[in-house]
Image (cartoon, grey):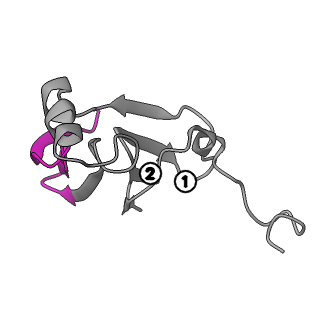
Amino acid sequence: DLMLSNSCIPFLGSTEGLDFRTLLLDEERGRLLIGAKDHIFLLNLVDLNKNVKKIYWPAAKEKVELCKLAGKDAHTECANFIRVLQPYNRTHVYVCGTGAFHPLCGYIELG
């Protein structure tokens, strides 16, 4: 219904099958951060498809191999699924991912 009424703008970057997991809305700056499989997206709230910024953050190859050796599915479990997007201060966001069952965290500077 939303598509038919032209009252929404679909995010075209989702065609990559990235398994979106978490969102962080930054109303003050008009941005949306999306955590996905091996990626973090920074979108403009006015037009989700304009000036999309994307960070590719995969799990380390050796961690992916260990994950597969443990019997996990390479496509649905052995990746870095971004689970945490948390404001840290005015300039940074704290981010954590599964890291193929070896969690890793870091800070993203929002420039």
Q: Which residues are magenta?
A: 86-111
Q: Amino acid at mark 2?
A: Arg
**In this rendering, is residue 52 above or below 88?**
above
Q: Is residue 17 magenta?
A: no
Q: Position of residue 61 (x, y in %)?
A: 20, 25
Q: Residue at x 61, y 36 (%)?
A: 50
Determine which quarter of the picture holds residue 106.
top left
* Residue furthest out toward the bottom: 1
Q: Residue 42 lies in what quarter of the image? A: top left
Look at 11% across and 48% down and name the residue there: 103
Instruction: Name the residue tied to disc 2.
Output: 31
Q: Quadrant of the C terminus?
A: top left
* Mark-to-mark CA distance, 2 and 1: 5 Å
Please name the residue that numbered disc 1 is placed on.
Answer: 45
> Which numbered disc covers residue 67?
none
Q: Observer-nearest residue: 90 or 70?
A: 70
Question: Dot 2, how many residues are within 10 Å of its Cα: few (below 14), some (14-19), or many (20+)?
Answer: some
Q: Position of residue 64 (x, y in %)?
A: 21, 34
Q: Is residue 58 above or below residue 21?
A: above
